[in-house]
Image (tube, rainbow, N blue to C red):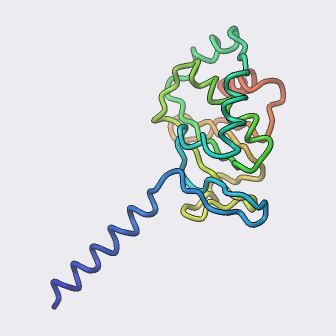
Amino acid sequence: MKLKNLLLIVLVFAFFSSYSQIRNRVVEDVNVYQNVLIGECTKSGLIFEDFGLHMKYEYDNYQPDTNTINKVAKKIDGLKITIVLGTWCKDSKKQVPRFLKILDKLKFNEKDITIIGVNSKMHAFVMSIDQYKIEKVPTFIFYRKGKEVGRITETPKKTLEKDMLKQMK
């Protein structure tokens, strides 16, 4: 009897552990009357529904400043980035694909990027994002050696690549 209970506990734990690790989870956000990505996302997962159309358009049409990209490239060693976005959000639809294009131009390692989707109430449900102190999306957070060194919130002050370079100084 004890073995059956232990086995049941292990199976339940394994189910919930794997469920919480699902990426690109789509849920309905009743506040904006659309499906949104929640929790951890992948770059390929962002190509979904309406967000995917904006993603492709902005990614394809954005032309990052090569001179600034070259300067950023010299400063990205050891950098990790967290992107918190809302697939329902106009600024996320514009800025996230542009930012991802910059990262692609930099040949930035995807394993050093964490992408988190939130609903219109800034909740990710399947994971806590309190530690990021998100007020607006998108928010791009830069880390070195586990410490935040800067962030870009909502829209860049100049351009994404120029703001990114400023965060690296």
* Image point (38%, 61%), residue name: 18
Is 81 placed above or below 120 here? above
Q: Quadrant of the C terminus?
A: top right
Q: Compare residues 114 and 88 and report the one nearer the observer.
A: 88
**Horizontal and vertical percent position of residue 165:** 69, 22
**Horizontal and vertical percent position of residue 27:** 62, 61
Find the residue positioned furthest to the right.
Answer: 157
**Horizontal and vertical percent position of residue 145:** 50, 36
Locate residue 160: give its quadrant: top right
**Horizontal and vertical percent position of residue 104:** 56, 23
Report the number of discs: 0
Query: Is 82 displayed left or right of 135 in the figure?
Result: left
Locate residue 39: give its quadrant: bottom right
Is 129 placed above or below 67 here? below
Find the residue positioned furthest to the bottom.
Answer: 1
* Image point (72%, 13%), residue name: 65
Locate residue 91: give its quadrant: top right
* Image point (77%, 53%), residue name: 135
Query: Is 79 displayed left or right of 56 in the figure?
Result: left
Q: Quadrant of the N terminus?
A: bottom left
Find the residue positioned furthest to the top.
Answer: 67
Is 166 placed above or below 17 here? above
Q: Compare residues 61 and 128 and report the one nearer the observer.
A: 61
Q: Compare residues 67 and 33 and report the one nearer the observer.
A: 33
* Image point (21%, 78%), residue name: 7
